[in-house]
Amino acid sequence: MSTVIDRPPTVTAVGGGVDRPPVHERRRWGLTVVGAVVATVFLAPYVIMLVGAFKTRPEILRVPPTYLPENWEPGNFLTMWDTPETPLPANLLSTVVISLGGTALALLAALPAAYYTARHNFRLKLPFMLLVLVTQMLQPTVLASGLFREFVTLEINDTWLAMILVNAAFNLSFAVWIMHSFFASVPKEIEEAAWLDGCSRSQSLRQIMLPLVWPGIVTAVIFTFIACWNEFAASLILLPTDTNQPLTVALTRFIGQYESAWQYVFAVSIIGILPVVALFALIEKHLVSGLTAGGVK
Amino acid sequence: MATVTFDGASRYYAGNDRPAVDQLDLEVADGEFLVLVGPSGCGKSTTLRMLAGLEGVDEGAVRIGDRDVTNLPPKDRDIAMVFQNYALYPHMTVADNIAFHLKIKKVPKAERAERVREAAKLLDLEPYLERKPAKLSGGQRQRVAMGRAIVRRPQVFCMDEPLSNLDAKLRVQTRTQIASLQRRLGVTTIYVTHDQVEAMTMGDRVAVLKDGLLQQCDTPINLFGKPKNLFVAGFIGSPAMNLIPATVEGESAVIGGQPIQLTPAQREALTSSKVVVGVRPEGWTLKPAGEGISAMVEVVEELGSDQFLYCSTSAELAAADAADVDVAEAPHTITVRAPGMSAFQRGEKVGIVPQTGAVHLFDAETGDRLPD
Amino acid sequence: MTAPSTATRSLKRRVRRQTTLQALPWLAPALILIGGVVVFPIGYMIYTSFRDLTRFGTDRGWAGLENYERVLELDHLSRVLSNTALWVVGVVALSVGLGLVLAQFLNKRFPGRKILRLVIIVPWAASVVMTSTVFVYGLDPFYGIINQFLVDVGILDTPYGFLKNALPGFLSAMAVAVFVSVPFTTFVFLAGLQTVPHDVLEAAQIDGASRVQTYWRVVFPMLRGALAVATIINVINVFNSLPILKTMTGAIPGYDADTTTSLMFKIIQNDRQIDTASALSVLNFIVVVVVIGVYLRVVRPMRED
């Protein structure tokens, strides 16, 4: 994918003229300037967030506001855990447990399905893949009341388990799709060669297939993890107890309060965003194909 | 080392009425080089994969030596296979690729290294042992695939079109190398190809398949000299045998005014009055125009050592051609071999006569060869 | 060839049944998860929409179409419906338009392009709730830093309470929705641009097409698939979006800044009317199903390559 995009587009090259390299170069740097403006727009909210996380409470509520903190206050990252609005340590734990659990469950369910559908043809393959695809387009938001009723009936409402199930189910399709395409890209003869070389099915899966589809598995894991991490709507309905709520829901408790503790909102947000963005950058290349199930090629 | 036996082996695919391999009976001797050949979809690869255990056997049995392997998984069959796309493990070096089986079988490290070196030496792979497959040329990859097979010293080699991804020149070279290597190692080998030249030059025996059915399994000489039916006659040999439909009247069939005598046994075996007369391009004698079957040279194909003349024939032959005879490539033209650098010209009129002993006769209804 | 005997026919049937049965253990975990957490709740939701539930969830029996009637009789329904239409059409149209431009820009080669690609990922990866809170803070008329900036550069005379009233609050929420939708949209178009073969562009140049002509006559038609995907997936995402409205306009009294999705959540959370909410959810679900149908029709995903 990146090799194609790294190629210089001829449209620019021809337009610039080959015999005037300086003009050409200047034009490119001109694009860089435009790019910098675009980057500023996309980063601005997060810069505000970062800066706000270092302001003291009086300063962040000051009228008129300051752009940069007069006193940098890194202590927010420590004191926020005791803030009265919400039990933040419990919320972070919820987010982590739900994300890890949801990711593990999604992977466990998706991996065998992705492998089997990539390797075998059977009559129910198309209906199955269609079902998976439709799941991707459904979101817990639209089913919130049904999920709520189901979990109340099962008496697992307001538990981490409920959210682990929801996250795993609704992110299953991306995991299936992306891993399916990785498995399918390994010629089946390679696996057959391993069998003939004396491998059992599990040996060939571990020693041959796993190293080859590893990037696909990593992509699935990271994407699912991030989606769980950022989930909001279902948690809002299914987790009424504050200590069970993930960070996303906990943050909304700050808002609408008189004199919100914005410095804590932002400090939490920084912690909630940084790792996720770093992980996301790792899998950027495979995202589109997984999200559109081959709709764009 | 071992024999290989297919005993009424069949394979069905879901959603297909005809079996991919239909009641195959085939016996391969110890150390023999057997080639499976046929057009695409004839079941030759499926046959090989049934032997390797990569396809199930729905009916019948497959045996290696005295062992019934019909229901054994591939790993327990002691078979090495060379795939068409080589199927090298992309994440392993050449050395690790070759040594993988030995590693799985827990062969001690020292012996492993020794055997890998041996195989690499045999195949001129020593300089590349530490490279990954992606960094190799097509020919080198092919040799790694061979190395991975021979290092195992298996009971049977399976080769599935191992040369089809090489360019023409390398293919001819490698053809000879594989054949001589196999004879040196003496390992029973089943080799699948769609290229009849490969089949004829490499195999001790060649099995011709069509639509999942074994047509004939014989030495290259017999396959060429005594094809058992019309399909084999047309498939083996290049350019293909001329197959000319004719009607038997009395004791002979007549093509282009030339009577072809049938023996009583042949007339006895006929199911109708229709026969197909087969003459290979080199089975004709060229005569001046007016003698034999009159023909006109349409195209001259000069190969240097040989010259092939594609001749149109009389209206009578063309009419016979239109008769409802199921010959794959009905001869609108007749191919005739002439000595290389002959002076034939396009448009020239010539006469052709089949040489004695060069005539193959087939029953037009069943397609079977008539007794000689 | 003789007709297949009964024996071979039953053999074939066995072969076929085997392959389907063999698939089951591999698919079972996924099927159970989808069945239990996606398909079953759909059914349960539809069932609930025809029941009469107390605020505490006690089922008082069959309600017929009462819940649906209650939804249709909501005073603010017409406003919420027009809000929803504006929300979906406005956000998707702007996201697609900006995404198209941005993708075209990112497809050029210039120093820093790779960094820009990474930067654009940030709003996509970040929690939408967290992103929205920045705007809630920044647009505050007193201590809001964005307000201050707009005053300082002269766009506004005095800070403005963007999120204090329904209309400006809703429009601000739309702007944030566009902001978080553009990255995904851009990347879909970038993937689409990569499918445009290089030689086709060269051919267009040799044919004497100008750069504008090349784009509209050659490149854009080849982006139709990406356009369909980006539009439809965005429609689903934007229609189902809750966090932006919840954080930015959730505090505004009344329902003038609500879409059907945020209204449904208010009915669950504030009014605790799961039965009415279910009826509204069923209506939302029908919309989503129609969009999915369009997606399957137009995009034909899962084409085997």
Image (cartoon, coloured by chain):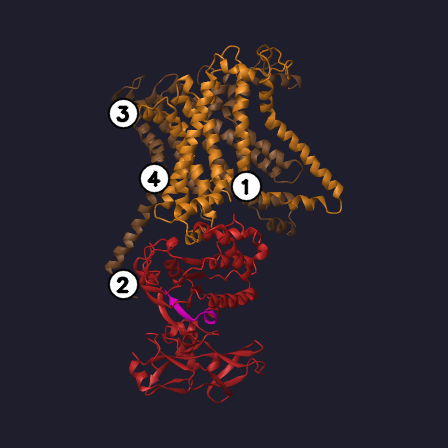
Chain colours: A orange, B red, C brown
Q: Chain of mark 3?
A: C
Q: CA distance from mark 4 to mark 1?
A: 33 Å
Give the residue at mark 3.
C64
Give the residue at mark 4.
C28
> Magenta span covers which residues?
B199-211
Image quadrant where one finds the N terminus of chain A = top right
Whether labels 2 and 3 belong to a single chain: the reply is yes
Picture layout, residue C161 above or below residue C200: above
Whether labels 4 and 2 belong to a single chain: the reply is yes
State the image coordinates of residue B132 (x, y, percent, origin top left): 55, 50
Quadrant position of residue A27: top right
Quadrant position of residue A160: top left
Mark nearer the N terminus (1 vs 3): 3
State the image coordinates of residue A51 (x, y, percent, origin top left): 61, 19
Q: Are marks 2 and 3 in contact (CB under 8 Å)?
A: no
Picture layout, residue C175 above or below residue A66: below
For label 4, the crowd category at 10 Å Cα-Cα, with few meaning under 14, some 14 to 19 and many 20 or more, is: some
For badge 4, the amino acid type reads: Ala
Give the residue at mark 2.
C3
For badge 1, the amino acid type reads: Ala
Q: Secondary structure at mark 1?
A: helix
Q: CA distance from mark 1 to mark 3?
A: 49 Å
For badge 2, the amino acid type reads: Ala
Mark nearer the N terminus (2 vs 3): 2
Quadrant position of residue C96: top right
Mark nearer the N terminus (1 vs 2): 2
Q: Secondary structure at mark 3?
A: loop
